[in-house]
Amino acid sequence: MSLSIPVVWSDEHRGHDPATGVWIGVPIPNDEVPERAETIRAALEAAGAHLVAAEPHADDTLLAVHDAALVDFLRGAWEAWSSAGLTYDPGQPDVVGYLFPTAGLLSGVEPRVPQALSARTGAYCYDTLTPISPGTWDAARGAVDAASTAADLVAEGAPAAYACCRPPGHHVTRSSFGGSCYLNNAAVAAQQLRARGCKRAALLDLDAHHGNGAQAIFRDRDDVLTGSVHVDPGAGWFPHFVGFADESGPTNLNVTLAPDSGDEAWLEGVDLLIAAAREHRSAALVVPLGVDAAVDDPNAPLRVTELGFREAGRRLAGLGLPTVFVQEGGYVLETIGALVLATLVGFEEGRS
Ligand SMILES: [Zn+2]
């Protein structure tokens, strides 16, 4: 296999390395580790890919998909946490929430931003699994720059580009982050394509978990179609509260799969997303590319093979659209590089 799709890269991701996440009150090892991106990069470079450095971008397209309050919180959260002394009393090295303004707590009262920093995190982060470490902001902002740069390459005529984004982003809504994600890189890429003259874009999410962020961000717009093929949240999988098939509408399609679904069912789902993009008459494509639907990935119960990912790449290429791939999940270091490579090689096979 050899690869000509440019790979956009930011070194900033290395600074994002939280010690733990907190799950049902228990600190658990963080599996969204820097080695993920390094392993993918090594596999793509070994296949002949060339690296493009992420270019710094102004906040314009970022602020078109996220509230300024969320961006401001993320930018300053760790310094504020450290200045407040929370890193040594009670001794939490990373920013983690503990109180969340659920609909039941508020019971119709407008939510406020808490004065206490220890509580303020809950106004922006919807889980306890997504800690902010000292390098998180720079890494998340670097990932947005990588996605924006990939969108620029495609807007300027490249048939496709791949942004090796870390941390991932597809669980981030307009105002709230979680699911190991901080800023929605793929949504920024779609917005950047729109800003650079593409009239209609499709965002088709292949990660094993629902792309709830883009669904929320683009819900009321018909210029960006959102689609996602993922394990059924109703079967007990993240994000649990959203991602059901009946949330589909004129410009959103959720294809839900039963646990243990393999290549055949998954590729049928991919075909449904492709058909929706055709009907939408999208002029460009953004693919949030998680590879955690893989058979050996412990974070999701789907059973997609390397050949399945390669075939998905081929079928996506059949749309004939300029395409931006944005890295999302995938947690098995032994296979993540080969799975991303297979998808991109399949795409190139489908274009030729
Ligand atoms: Zn995932």
Image: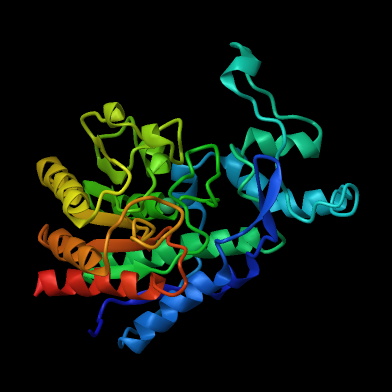
Instruction: Report the residue at 38% width, 75% height from top.
Output: 337
Judging depth in this view, the residue of 264 and 93 nearest the camera is 264
Q: From what the image shows, is residue 300 above or below residue 250?
A: below
**Displayed quadrant of residue 231:** top left
Judging depth in this view, the residue of 80 and 168 nearest the camera is 168
Judging depth in this view, the residue of 134 and 25 nearest the camera is 25
Judging depth in this view, the residue of 194 and 4 nearest the camera is 4
In this rendering, position of residue 5 left or right of residue 147: left
Tell me if I can see residue 287 in this picture: yes
The scheme the figure's colours follow is rainbow
Percent coordinates x, y for residue 180 in the rendering? 55, 52
Instruction: Report the residue at 32% width, 63% height from top.
Output: 325
Instruction: Report the residue at 24% width, 54% height from top.
Output: 262
Tell me if I can see residue 283 in this picture: no
Outermost residue toward the front?
260
Percent coordinates x, y for residue 336 in the rendering? 40, 70
Percent coordinates x, y for residue 294 in the rendering? 34, 60
**Displayed quadrant of residue 341:** bottom left
In this rendering, position of residue 214 left or right of residue 113: left
Q: From what the image shows, is residue 350 above or below residue 276?
A: below
Outermost residue toward the top?
108
**Quadrant into which the C terminus falls:** bottom left
